[in-house]
Image: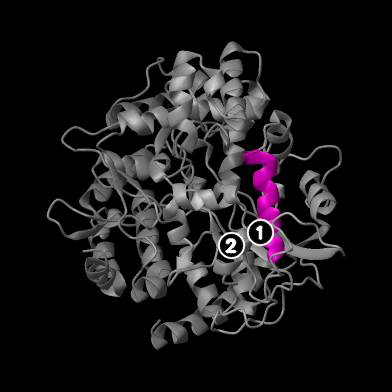
Amino acid sequence: MKSIHKRVFALVIALVIVAGLAACGGSGDQSGGTGGGTPAPASNNNSGAAAPAPVADGPLTPYAEPVTITWAVQASQVQKFFDGDTYEDNRWSRKIKEDLNIDLEVYFSADISTDAFRNRINVALASGDLPDIFNWSDRTWFTQAYEAGYLYDMTDLYAQYATDNVKAYQDKWPGGFKGASIDGRLYAFPSMVDNFHQAVYLWIRDDWLEKAGGKPPQTVDEMVEMARILTSGDGSTYGFALNNKFDESNFGNIAGLASAFGAPVRGQDVYYRGSDGKMQFGWIQPGVKDALAVVRDMYAEGLIDPEFVVKDGGTLEVDVANGKVGMMYHMNWGTWYPYNFVYESEGVITRPYPIPTQAGHDFKVGINSNESPEYMFMLNANTKHPEAFMKILNLYEATVESSDKADNFQDFWADEQYRLCPVFVPIPTELYADVLHPALAANDRDSLATGVQVYYDWIKNFEAGTDTNPNAYGTWGQMFERGSMAVALYDYSGHIVQSVMSTERPEIWYQNSSILEGILRTTFTDIITGAKPLDAFDEAVADWLANGGQQTLDELEVMYP
């Protein structure tokens, strides 16, 4: 890495400490874990940590004496607890203790549905005070932690301790492992990646759709008209929901609208080659300006809550649960969150629909590179027991993924129980679509693996009305015959644009990505609210290009010829 990156990194760290501490005072830290306090050597050669134990100490061999492992908890409003369980004492913590003689200690926890976890993990990066095991997918953070020497090189650890079943994931989904590697060395255990499922959809509550005539909108104009019908006019309901970070891959975004006008976007990562063969960035395309014009007019008409500018995901979640909003763009997992709250409280189903299109435009849906994992489980370079990471991972795989006991899947995966394990195998449910769809159509349960049979049962039983638990509803929303996976695989076929940017990224991108994001989001917000004219979009694009955007495009041209 270039020395200028090191200097910028030091400045960023200083700023993160100030901003992060202001945002996260009282974060619930616990002292005395094995992971914190002393930054590892910058070489990432694990010289400050214990070497893996001898091979005789097998992949699932319990420790003779108790070992304590600290971890960072991504707390969530959807987390389920049973029988008095907590993040500190639960099914997984007890199983890990019983099977491996490992005591888990929560080093810190913060809400992942808001900026709380991002702020807290940034403070940990700035101070070097990290737990043994932590999970974060931000590529800039990952690179900075590597450069600071905080990450354990788990290449040899993985080769020595991973079971054959765990190693098989690298053969089947190599992209995620490449994304979790630097210079050919593995620094994280990634999610399994095939990002077709990252597409965006329009989600509408069944009762609101019925109120609007029962027919989902096919065009942008029809979507706007439906928003008019669904807006009360007295502030009790709004036809179209926006998140204040509407340019991120979360609910309440405008990605679906931008896509309708031919601009493929998803978060800040979609760089692609346009029809002229040149490198492009989704959010600076002319179609985004057209989309902003639509949103601006909807806002002016009162179809959007004027308080959206201060509503993050957690606040918007409350509006969804309370029935204040009933139509918005969202990713494929809406029945898991946040529409699970609507179903649980009111029994109302919310469904995904293909994005409404715009005449004269070829719609384009942006997704990330298959080398951009959504989960990256990392290990502190100073950890005293690095092999514990692999033992826990192996135990998870043996308990949930390869076990022939259906109860194991229900007890240790369902109801968000998998999140209580410090490191797990992140296989999105969506990746089973290719086997579930034909099995569901043929009523062929027996052809499926044990864990996938559970998904099959949830879908069939939900449709039959015999299983209405959140797991059944969540899975059904993705996998039924017109669920989000069917839309992505069939309706969006030929319209998916995958980012070319994967593991290798320009130095200028690392330095300026947050600045570039701020330039566009601030101007877009001002356009929507009427504080600036629509043509301010062109000025923002010029600023984006001048502040490192053009250099990013130029360097990506060379990196990804």
Q: In the picture, residue 460 is in which quadrant?
A: top right
Rendered-image quadrant of the C terminus: bottom left
* Residue 160 found in image quarter: bottom right
Q: Which residue is mark 1?
A: 390
- In the displayed structure, 165 sits above or below 322; it is below
Q: Most extreme residue toward the top, as rendered? A: 464
Residue 484 shows in the view: no
Magenta highlight on residue 395? yes
Is residue 442 in view from this perspective?
yes
Q: Residue at x 37, y 37 (%)?
A: 301
The residue carrying mark 2 is: 158
Q: Main secondary structure of the magenta part?
A: helix
Colour treatment of the image: one colour
Looking at the picture, tell me which residue is in the foreground, 369 or 162. Answer: 162
Near-viewer residue (203 or 527): 203
Counting from the top left corner in percent of width and height, residue 445 is at 55, 19
User: Are there few (<14), some (14-19), or many (20+) residues within 10 Å of tag 1?
Assistant: many
| Identity of the residue drawn at 23% across and 43% down | 262
Q: CA distance from mark 1 to mark 2?
A: 7 Å
Task: Choose the circle earlier in sequence order: 1 or 2.
Answer: 2
Amino acid type of the residue tagged 1 in the rendering? Met
| Tags 1 and 2 touching, CB below 8 Å | yes
Spot occupied by residue 53 in the image (x, y as percentages of width and height) = 71, 70
| Residue found at the very far front of the displayed protein | 56
- Report the amino acid beneath label 2: Tyr
Answer few, some or many: residues within 10 Å of disc 2's Cα (few below 14, many 20 plus, some between 14 and 19).
Answer: many
